[in-house]
Amino acid sequence: MLFSELYGAYYNAVAAILKKAAEKPLTKEEMRQTVEKYAFGESFVTIEAALRNGDWPLLGEDGRSVLKNAPEMPLTLLQKRWLKAISLDPRVKLFGDCIPDFPEVEPLFTGEDYEVFDRYSDGDDYSDEGYIGRFRLILRAIGERTPLRFEVKNRTGAVSRFTAMPEYLEYSEKDDKFRLMTSGCRYGSVVNLGRIVSCEECFGELRGSPPRERRRAEETLVFEITDERKALERVLMHFAHFEKEAERIGEKTYRVSLRYDKDDETELVIRVLSFGPFLRVVSPQSFVNLIRERLMMQKKYGL
Amino acid sequence: MPYSELIKNFSRVRDYMREFYVYGFKSRDEYTKKSARSYDDEKRRMESLLGDRMRFRRTAEGKNVFLSIDTRVSRRNPLYKAWKAKSFTDGDITLHFLLLDLLASEKSGLSVPEITDRLSGVFPDSARVFDESTVRKKLKEYEAEGLVRTEKSGKSLLYSLSCPNDLAPCADMLGFFSEVSPCGVIGSFLLDKTDAGEGSFAFKHHYITGALDSGIAAELFAAMREKRSVILENANRKNDSVAKIVAVPLKIMCSAQSGRQYLMAFVPRFRRITSFRLDNILSVTAGEECERFDEYRAALAGMRKNMWGISTQSRGGDRLEHVEFTVRYGKNEPYIRQRLEREKRCGTVEDIDGNTAKFSADVFDASEMIPWIRTFLCRITEIHFSDPDTEKRFLDDLHAMYGLYGLGEEADGNAVQ
């Protein structure tokens, strides 16, 4: 069963407390920090009281755990079945043979049971041994904070070489591609993994103090939705992944503000166009102009 | 019942979380038609689970609550927290830790009386007593979950702990698949067993509301694996009704461009394969094994080449609808031609000349393609739909767009003057 206390934040928090309380009793502050790490905003009051007053008699009078062992829960059948399903995914090769083998377990689902139907068809090739090797090297370098020297092919086929600190990998399900966010390189900070020809560890110091997160040039897009043909639901679902606010401004009209990365503006323009006349951009004016330009060009074709 | 951070039933939190996250413009009054107290409790629970991701805004209609999450920044799906808020009793949690600890200390198995006896030794003076029946029930539950295993010894059934697995080497893999895989919340449960930090992966175009339908998806997968029919409780949001439908689940189809998940199922009553939105399914009850499961699934596979989205029926009455349109692009814009190839889900792309390409397809429902076709606006030189109503609607909408941005017929008139 998926909705079970066995996977619950309270069980995890109590397990962590009991692990720590095996050696010595926890102070109130230590217990608070542990609960905050594993559970929710109001959990501490409940958990502390239940452990202290004996409703959950898992701490002795001296405040130490009554257990003889560090609490550890084996994997449930559901967890094993999910892992088995993941072991059938082509992308799992990127991570090596880390999944334990469960020969007696049936997968929770297979590729026959599930499909992403609108993913683009030119995604990264996860069966390419070269790609797999570079992916693993990059992933390790991210964890170990090791700079990498790259050779990258651009759209025209020209190869550029540079050294950068790999920060994190970004995956798009729609594009089915990985991109690497880097820092410490003046030629740009985003590299498509599919375009990397080679990369190797480079233990030399990179200049400057690289930021952990890439800084995005953020803009706010404001548009109005006319709720016809279920446009409201479709638009809000489609743009759900942005940080956004929606408000009702009329009986069937709504205004939405969302924050977007300026680098993705062209993509956002065509996504806005896809909603036709039910979505009208209000600001910024530069974005309105981009929509207008496209419509003016379209009108010239006489449709 | 006094307020508790934990919940017994997932369905209410599923509804509220989706409302706060996807919509977020409703005022308290709109939620409180059924119960003001439920709303206040759910709001408080969301604040507790999701912290500063909950936002508030004052409007003329009152205070609005909404969830604002940039999923490109948030590396772990915050909605998974709802799945970790199941309530339990004092006895459940106490017995859980004591039982697993007891079994961890024993290499050989123990019978129920032995386990009960040893548990009573932990707190000889305590009021906390677990009788044999309670212990047996919990052990049976844990055996079904896979936490403990059994072996026969004479007439006794001996219980021992299942083997633990070290997941530390899997942390990166779990961090990735917990966000992109169906029922990814299970990966999140596994990640909780590791000390993984925020992880090495971020996600673009990342839809997270599917997390709330993970329980429904898991039940449908279980039925598919066993080739069973199911009884769906399906909500009709338009008229606020719920229908019970017998169906044979064949596949879950997910959109990477909207985050919506659909069940494709054969419905005996309609005698055809149709789709159901997972977020509209309230419950799934497993039914009988379906002898014709493979036949229905093969039929769906055969239909896929004419499905743009999830529709399996035309609007105009024809079995299939034809669509074709031509796009023009500049010498330095070969990526437009590439876009047609990589974004099409069926149909063909044909080069007319070095700067013009024609896309054509036969699909069940051409109206599903319109949002995609509009993404080529500014380059469409010709477009034809076999269904005249669809073509008229496309062109009417296009003219309405011209009007929205001051490029309508009125603007043409002004230009002449």
Image (cartoon, coloured by chain):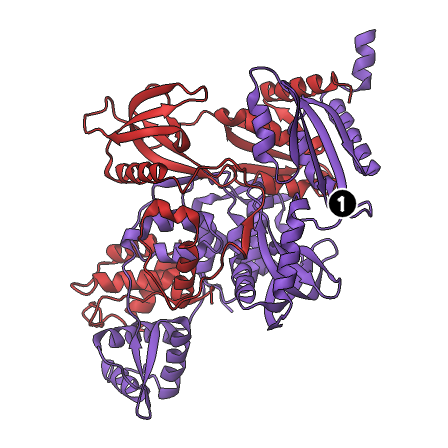
Chain colours: A red, B purple
Q: Is residue A287 above or below residue B35?
A: above
Residue A238 picture location, percent across and down:
59, 40
Which image quarter: residue B12?
bottom right
Q: Nearer the viewer, residue A211 or A253?
A: A211
Which image quarter: residue B193?
bottom left
Q: Nearer the viewer, residue B74 or A301?
A: A301
Q: Is residue B171 left or right of residue B292?
A: left
Q: Is residue A303 left or right of residue B102?
A: right
Residue B200 picture location, percent across and down:
34, 41
Mark 1 packing: few (<14 Cα in 10 Å), some, or many (20+)?
many
Q: Secondary structure at mark 1?
A: loop
On the question of residue B36 being in view, the answer is yes
Q: Nearer the viewer, residue A122 or B316?
A: A122
Q: Is residue B394 left or right of residue B233?
A: right
Residue B304 picture location, percent across and down:
64, 49
Q: Nearer the viewer, residue B114 or A248?
A: B114
Q: Is residue A203 above or below residue A15?
A: above
Seen as rendered, the residue at the extreme left is: A23
- The residue labelled by disc 1 is B320
On the question of residue B17 being in view, the answer is no
Which image quarter: residue B299?
bottom right
Question: Which kind of residue does numbered mark 1 sit on?
Answer: Leu
Seen as rendered, the residue at the extreme top is: B417
Q: Quadrant of the C terminus of chain B?
A: top right
